[in-house]
Image (spheres, rainbow, N blue to C red):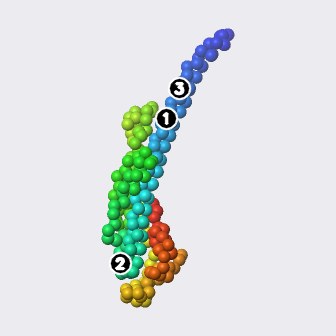
Amino acid sequence: MQPRNSDAGQAFPIYITVVGGLLFLAFAYLAVGQAAANRNSAQTAADAAALAAALERRDQLAGAWVQDLLDPAEWQDIFDGEAEGIGPSCWRAHELAAQNDATVRCAPDGPLGYTVESRTNKPVGDSIVPGTEDKHAKASATAVIEPRCTFDLSAGEAEAEGGPLPLLTCKDREWELDPKGPVELLPKPEDLFDVHLAD
């Protein structure tokens, strides 16, 4: 009959192998988790930056509409994103990306949208996967601006001096516009335009 410590000696290498395998799996899961977290950070930065640029343009378009309130012939161009004098909006994307510890490339996607590509400032870091220490997560997002309002230029004497302005129908509300009323009673940017991420 063999001593019991001989069985223990045979089991020890198996034990070491199993523990080593479990440790390897744990580090592998950690590396995957690090990469996923970095990727989520990049996507968050891209989403926020694209929305910020689109919201900035929406606000400028809404301001242009208020300026041209008495000239309804210009309204459609504004709702199509083609208003004159609109400034750049990508600076807002860069500002939001910096707050999310990322850098971005931002470009208009037509007159009513922005596409942003983001890159995290922090790399994935050291892990058991070779080369991850210098890898930066990247992501992209597109935000679009959608007009919420319609109007009929043929209704009333809209273009005549002092004539009634067209009825502005914005989704679930109708606006009877009074050019002599306070600006506070006019539709807000969010009444005129929706801003959301593209599907």
Instruction: Report x, y in % for residue 47.
Output: 44, 55
Residue 154 in view in this figure: no
Q: What residue sits right under mark 3 in the picture?
A: 20
Label 2 to label 1: alpha-carbon separation? 59 Å
Q: Quadrant of residue 83?
A: bottom left
Q: Above or below — where is 166 with respect to 99? A: below
Local secondary structure at mark 1 = helix
Q: Is residue 14 left or right of residue 163?
A: right
First in sequence, mark 1 or 3: give its number: 3
Query: Which of label 1 and label 3 is nearer to you?
Result: 1
Amino acid on which disc 1 is placed: Ala
**SS label for mark 2:** helix
User: Residue 30 at what x, y percent from top left?
Assistant: 51, 36
Q: Which residue is under mark 2?
A: 74
Which residue type does callout 2 highlight? Glu
* Coordinates of residue 108 in the picture (x, y in percent): 34, 61
